Image (tube, coloured by chain):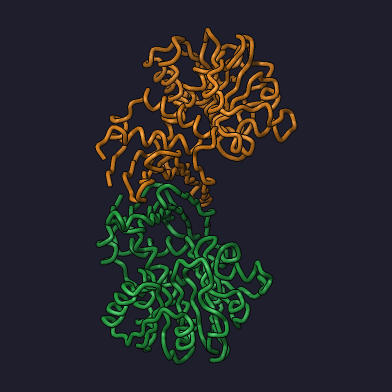
Chain colours: A green, B orange
Amino acid sequence: MKILNKKQIISRLDIDLAAQRLEEGFIAFSRGNVQVPPTQAFTFPLANGDCCIKSAHVEGSDTFTVKISTGFYDNPSKGLPSNDGMMMVVSAITGQPIALLQDEGWLTCIRTALAGRIAARLLAPAKVEAIGILGTGTQARMQLEQLASFSPCRKVVVWGRGDNQLAAYRTFASDLGYEVEVTRNPEMLARSANLIVCATPSRQPLIRSEWVQPGTHITAVGADAPGKQELDPALVARVDRIIVDALTQCSQYGEVSHALKAGLIGEQQLTELGALLENCVPGRDNDDQVTLVDLTGVAVQDAQIASCVLGSLEL
Amino acid sequence: MKILNKKQIISRLDIDLAAQRLEEGFIAFSRGNVQVPPTQAFTFPLANGDCCIKSAHVEGSDTFTVKISTGFYDNPSKGLPSNDGMMMVVSAITGQPIALLQDEGWLTCIRTALAGRIAARLLAPAKVEAIGILGTGTQARMQLEQLASFSPCRKVVVWGRGDNQLAAYRTFASDLGYEVEVTRNPEMLARSANLIVCATPSRQPLIRSEWVQPGTHITAVGADAPGKQELDPALVARVDRIIVDALTQCSQYGEVSHALKAGLIGEQQLTELGALLENCVPGRDNDDQVTLVDLTGVAVQDAQIASCVLGSLEL
C-alpha cells in the first residue's frame, strides 16, 4: 500500500485535471452511476469535535474511496489545526488497500474550492465586476485562488467578523494580485459584487435578498451540515436558477433546505450540478438572472480527486 | 501516525485481555454508551465483491475506530485471500489519526471468534459432550481455537460440503489436540454435539429443530448480512433463551430475523449479550434448555479490539 503525506499529495495533484475529473464525477453521480452510502457522523461534545465518514465508488472505476474528516474546534488553542482527515483508496477489483492519502483534510478543501470554480464557470455573469467572499478562513482563501484562474476580475470584497482575520485576508488576496476591500457589513459586499462565494460556518442568514444585484451569481459553500445557513430564504426564493450538488443532501441540510422547508420553493426548481454539466446548456439565460449553486460536498468528489492523485503514481 | 502490519498486530494482541475488553464493549453498547453510525455497504457485482465500513466510539474512550472490510470471492483464483481489511484509529480528543492497523481482516476474525468464546462461557451446558462446528473456513477454525481455551472437551464433529476442506479441517483440529469426526450430514453433527457453532455463508437452513438435543447451546456466526441463514426458523422458535449481539441488527438480518419475520418469535424474547453480561445472571437455568447466541458483528467490537492492540503501544 502506498502512503502519501500532504506535501506529496499537493505536489502530485494536477489541479486542472482534478477539475475535469470532478465534473465527470458530478455527471456520474447525477446519472445514478455512483455508489454513495449514507454519511457516518460522530459528535464529541466534550471535545467540541465532530467527524464524518464519506465513501463513494464510481461505476467502472478500479478503486473506491473512504474518507474520514474531523473538525475539533478547540484545537487551535492547542496549536493544532481544527480540521484533519485522510482518505483510504481500496481496489474495487480485489478489495485490497491501494493507498492511504494523509492529506490532513487538504483534498476536501481543494475539491470544494474546485466545485466553486466549476459553479462560477457555468453560472457567473459575462462580466464579473467584483468578487465577493463571505468569510476569511481556509475555504474562503481557496475559493478566491480558484476563481483567480477562472475570471480576469481582480477586484475582491471580503466580509469577516474580526479585524485581524480581515487584515490577514487582505494580505493574502493582495499577494494573489487583487485590489482588496474588506468590510464587516455584508450589505456593502452584496451591493458591490456580482460573483459571491459564501464560505462561513454561519448558522443564521448573512445576506438579504434586497441587497443582491440583478445578474449576480452566488455559490454557497458553508451550509454543509444541519443548522448551517448563510442566505436569507427570501433570497433563495428569488433566485432564477438554483443548482445543487446533490438533491438528497441539499433538500435535507443545504442552503436551499431552509427555503424548501418554509415552502418558498419546490424541489422541482432544483437542478443537480451533474445534470447541468451533462446537458451542456448555458447555466443562465441572460445577464440579469440571479443564480445560486448550493454545495454540500458529495463523496464522489473525494473518490474522483483521490483517483486523480493516484493516477500520477505507478501503482 | 503508527502503522502496524498483521504480524505486528498478532504479536501484540493479548487474547484474554481482548476478550475482557469485548465484554466491556458489549455492555457499553447495550447501555447505549457507544456511538455506532449505520454501516456503509458497497457491492461490486462484476468483481463478485463487497465492502462494509463500520465505525464506533465508546463513550469516554480517547479514540474511535473506522473499519473497512472487504470480501472478494474470486480472489482465491488469483492467489489472493477473499477477505481483506484495515482499521483506522482516530483521536476522539483532537481528531488526529493515531494508527492504521493493516490487519488484513484478522482483527475481525479474532473479535468474532472471541464473541463465540464469550457466548459459550455464558451459555454452554455444564458438560460439553462434543463440539459441533458447521463450516471449515477461517472462522470455523478460529472458533474452535477459542473454544479450546474455554472447554476441556476435546471431541469435535465438523460439517462441510467438500472432502478436501473436511480433510484439511481434520488435520487442523487434530493438531489442536481434538478427536475429530467429519461429516457431510448436518443431522449427524446436530445429534451428537451439544455445543454447536455455525460459521458458514449459507443462505438456507442447515440444522433442523428435531435434530437438536435438549441442553444444546448454539452460537450462530454466519448470518451477518441480509439473505444469510443457517438454522431452521422452527429451531429458533423452540430455543429457550435467545441472546443477540445487537437487537437492531439481528432483527433486520441476523439468524433470528427469519423467525421474527415469520412471526414465530417476538422481539421481547431477545436479550442483548451486553445486558446478559451486565446482569451477571446465569445464561441458562438448567442443563435441558436449548440456548442460542446470534452474532452479527458490532462495530464496538472493532473499537475495543483496536484499542486493545494500541494499549500495548507507547502512543
Q: Residue at x 36, y 72 (%)?
A: A162
> Which picture quadrant has residue B218?
top right
Q: Quadrant of the C terminus of chain B?
A: top left
Q: Nearer the viewer, residue B100 or B152?
A: B100
Q: Nearer the viewer, residue A200 or B85?
A: A200
Q: Residue at x 69, y 71 (%)?
A: A263
A306 left or right of B186 in image:
left
Q: Nearer the viewer, residue A43 or A282?
A: A43
A86 left or right of B27 in image:
left
Please determine whether, in this image, residue A77 is positioned above or below residue B26: below
> Which picture quadrant has residue A256?
bottom right
Total number of numbered labels? 0
Answer yes or no: is residue B164 visible: no
A247 left or right of A206 in image:
right
* Residue A65 locus on image (x, y percent): 42, 55
> Which picture quadrant has residue A178?
bottom left
* Residue A119 locus on image (x, y percent): 48, 77
* Residue B194 locus on image (x, y percent): 57, 13
B263 left or right of A105 in image:
right
Answer yes or no: is residue B289 visible: yes
Q: Residue at x 57, y 66 (%)?
A: A250
Q: Nearer the viewer, residue A5 or A292?
A: A292
Please determine whether, in this image, residue A211 is positioned above or below residue B227: below
* Residue A29 locus on image (x, y percent): 53, 65
